[in-house]
Amino acid sequence: MPLLQASNIGFQFDNGTGLFSDISLALNTGVVGLVGRNSVGKSILGTLLDKSIEPSEGEVMLVGRVESYSQLPAQILSKLTLAQYLGVDELLDVFDKIEQGSIDSAGRRGADQLRSR
């Protein structure tokens, strides 16, 4: 039996626009990549296959455990600011202090960080 099986799945946006329909596949154990042009529905198909969201039509069956990776996970960004996610939050804080005329030690360290980049 396949690890993951999708039967006649399709996805439709809330406004009624269909993205794809009638997709069936079976995957056995192993690493699988999904490749395609931008904006054709790869991310949505991936979230359907890992059962993060439900298809508008058809069925996805999982046996065992499936792991997936998203390029920019929304669940991470809901807990962090974009600056924190990118690792530039401290630098932005330093910019704010410099803009306000502060020359305290944090501002000086920040200026040193800027020079080292």
Image: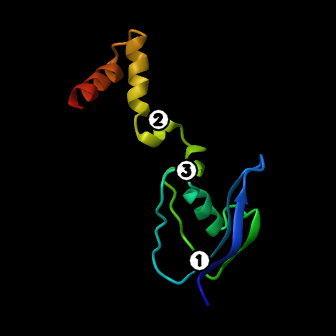
Hey, what amino acid is under mark 3? Ser
Q: Does 22 sit left or right of 74 as displayed? A: right
Q: Residues within 10 Å of mark 1 (few under 14, many from 20)?
A: few
Q: Position of residue 113 (x, y in %)?
A: 27, 29
81, 105: nearer the viewer: 81
| First reached walking from the N terminus: tag 3 or tag 2 | 3
Give the mark nearest the N terminus, 3 or 1: 3
Q: CA distance from mark 3 to mark 2?
A: 25 Å
User: 52 left or right of 81?
Assistant: right
The quadrant holding residue 23 is: bottom right
Q: Give me the disc on residue 83.
A: 2
Which color scheme does this rendered protein use? rainbow
Task: Tell me which residue sits at (50%, 37%) in the image.
Answer: 82
Q: Residue drawn at (49%, 65%), measured in percent from left and top?
A: 34
Q: For mark 3, what is the residue?
A: 39
Q: Residues within 10 Å of mark 3 (few under 14, many from 20)?
A: few
Question: Where is residue 90 shown, x and y percent of the image?
Answer: 41, 31
Q: Amino acid at mark 1?
A: Arg
User: In whole angstroms, how far apart are the C-alphas of marks 3 and 1?
Assistant: 27 Å
- 46 versus 87 height, above or below: below
Location of residue 24 (image quadrant): bottom right
Label whose residue precedes the other's in the sequence (1 or 2): 1
Mark number for residue 65? 1
Can residue 50 be seen here? The reply is: no
